[in-house]
Amino acid sequence: MARIAGVNVPDKKRTPIALTYIHGIGMTTAFAICEKLKIDVTKRMGELDEDTLNAIRSEIDSDAYTIEGDLRRQVSMNIKRLMDMKCYRGLRHRGGLPVNGQRTKTNARTRKGPAKPIAGKKK
């Protein structure tokens, strides 16, 4: 397994797909990296030589991309800032409710957790 940016990327997957295993790199960015470094997108990660892997590592480590720990820290700080401001989105985060305007009367079980029975609710 190749190790890029502290993540083990699978050898048997095509290069752009394998790069998406790194938090902060999606399909568009992965294809852009392959295009910039002139890597064939049909090649598997295990087929790449060490020079190509080093080129990928140096490209990802450049300041152009925010990935892994830095990105997770940045997202959590943004959420914490919203919660400290006590704005609507911050209150939704704090309450464990959907943030982006989804309905909560019937759905949102993933965010709200398992249904809690209410005593005397039976009809």
Image: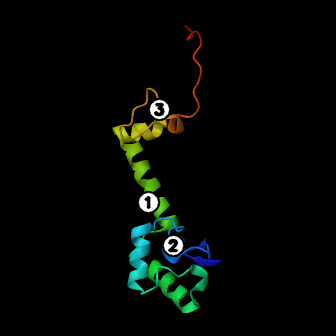
Q: Residue furthest right?
A: 1
Residue 71 lies, with reference to residue 109, above or below; the image says: below
Rounded to the nearest angstrom, the CA distance separating label 2 from label 3 is 34 Å
Return the residue at label 1.
74
Q: Earlier in the sequence, mark 2 or mark 3?
A: 2
User: Dividing the picture into quarters, in which one does residue 119 lie?
Assistant: top right
Q: Please state which of the two labelled residues, at mark 3 or mark 1, is closer to the viewer.
A: 3
Residue 62, position in %: x, y?
43, 80
Residue 40, position in %: x, y?
46, 84
Q: Earlier in the sequence, mark 3 or mark 1?
A: 1
Q: Residue furthest front?
A: 42
Return the residue at label 3.
107
Residue for point 56% across, 86% down: 48
In the figure, is residue 41 to the left or right of 45? left
Task: Say what secondary structure mark 3 lies in.
Answer: loop
User: Dividing the picture into quarters, in which one does residue 33 lie?
Assistant: bottom left
Rounded to the nearest angstrom, the CA distance separating label 2 from label 1 is 21 Å
Mark 2 crowd level (few <14, some 14–19, many ≥20, 10 Å Cα): many
Disc 2 marks which amino acid? Leu
Residue for point 52% across, 65% down: 69
Give the quarter of the figure containing the C terminus. Answer: top right
Residue 37 lies, with reference to residue 80, above or below; the image says: below
Return the residue at label 2.
19
Disc 1 marks which amino acid? Gln
Residue 60 seen anywhere in this rendered image of the structure:
yes
User: Dividing the picture into quarters, in which one does residue 116 lie?
Assistant: top right
